[in-house]
Amino acid sequence: MEGTHNNSKKHDYPIRKDSGSARTIQKIRQLFLTGHSFTARELNVLAGLDDVRKAIPVLWNMGGWPVVNCRLSDRRKVYRLEKGGER
């Protein structure tokens, strides 16, 4: 198949994802520490990201932050820091 892109190739250079950068994670932490609940769209705008949903698992897995999500009746998800979860 000519013209297709193979994503499984090994690269000689590091691939950096902005959603996992320390500066981005710090912005999201500061937003959650306000105690408010945010939709992904709101977090994207406030943190200046394209897809904050990729950064939230970094907080869960690497940071140990208890970020919880709830689905609203209009199918949107709201993310917030669990009560007593400030670190």
Image (cartoon, helix red, strand yellow):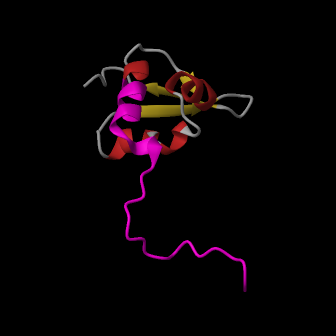
Q: Is residue 24 above or below residue 19?
A: above
Q: Residue furthest bottom?
A: 1
Q: In terms of depth relative to the viewer, which is nearer, 28 or 75?
A: 28
The residue positioned 42% from the left and 71% from the top of the image is: 11
- Identified at 42% across, 28% down, the residue is 28
- Residue 26 x, y percent position in the rendering: 35, 28
Report the number of numbered marks. Answer: 0
- The image position of residue 18, as x and y in percent, is 45, 43
- Residue nearest the viewer, comparing 39 with 11: 11
- Please tell me whether residue 56 is drawn above or below residue 82 in the rendered image: below
Q: Is residue 14 magenta?
A: yes
- At 46% across and 42% down in the image, what residue appears? 19
Secondary structure predominantly adopted by residues drawn in magenta: loop
Left/right placement of residue 28 relative to residue 39 reads left
The quadrant of the image that shows the N terminus is bottom right
Residue 49 position within the rendered picture, expressed as x and y whole percent measured from the top left: 54, 34
| Residue pictured at 33% horizontal, 34% vertical | 65
Q: Which residues are magenta?
A: 1-29
The reply to whether residue 48 is in sight is: yes
